[in-house]
Image (cartoon, rainbow, N blue to C red):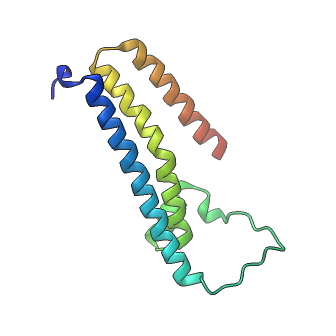
Amino acid sequence: MSAQDWNDQRIEVIIGALLRTGVLLAATVVLLGAIVYLVRHGGEIPNYAVFHREPDNLTSTTAILHGALGMSGRAIIQLGLLLLIATPVARVLFSAIAFALERDYLYVLITLIVLGILLYSLFESSG
């Protein structure tokens, strides 16, 4: 596909499909995690008298991935939420690539600044 094949309408269609796919994938993963969690823990009675923070095994990306591979319902739900967060980040990254293919370098720069701010806010707040 050449750079001339990239026009605004085509880019909007691809971005729309990217966002839809990301949200549907995230929702599917969260639903799968909810099913796994309810099958294993659905009969438990919650204790609302004491607040329990998120366990450490659900606070880092690598731990979430390991937990999801181990079929932990809560880890699968967290993975779905990570996918949901990653969806707009992927959209910004795709936009930067699309602007570069259109040779619109001012928008490439602006989009990369936005991407940098997004990534900084995601990784700085978790550390």
The residue depicted at 66 percent of the width and 85 percent of the height is 44
> In the rendered image, is residue 51 in sight?
yes
Give residue 22's position: percent from left, percent from top: 40, 49
Quarter assignment of residue 50: bottom right
Asked whether residue 127 appears in the rendered view, the answer is no
Name the side, left or right, on which 11 lies relative to 23: left
In the picture, which quadrant includes the N terminus?
top left
Q: Residue at x 47, y 40 (%)?
A: 88
Residue at horizontal 38%, vertical 28%? 95
Q: Residue furthest left?
A: 1
Residue furthest right in the image: 49
At 67% across and 66% down in the image, what residue appears?
Answer: 55
The correct choice, above or below, for 38 with respect to 94 in the image is: below
**Of residues 8 and 112, the one drawn nearer to the viewer in this rendering:** 8
The quarter of the picture where the C terminus appears is top right
Above-or-below relation of 34 to 122: below
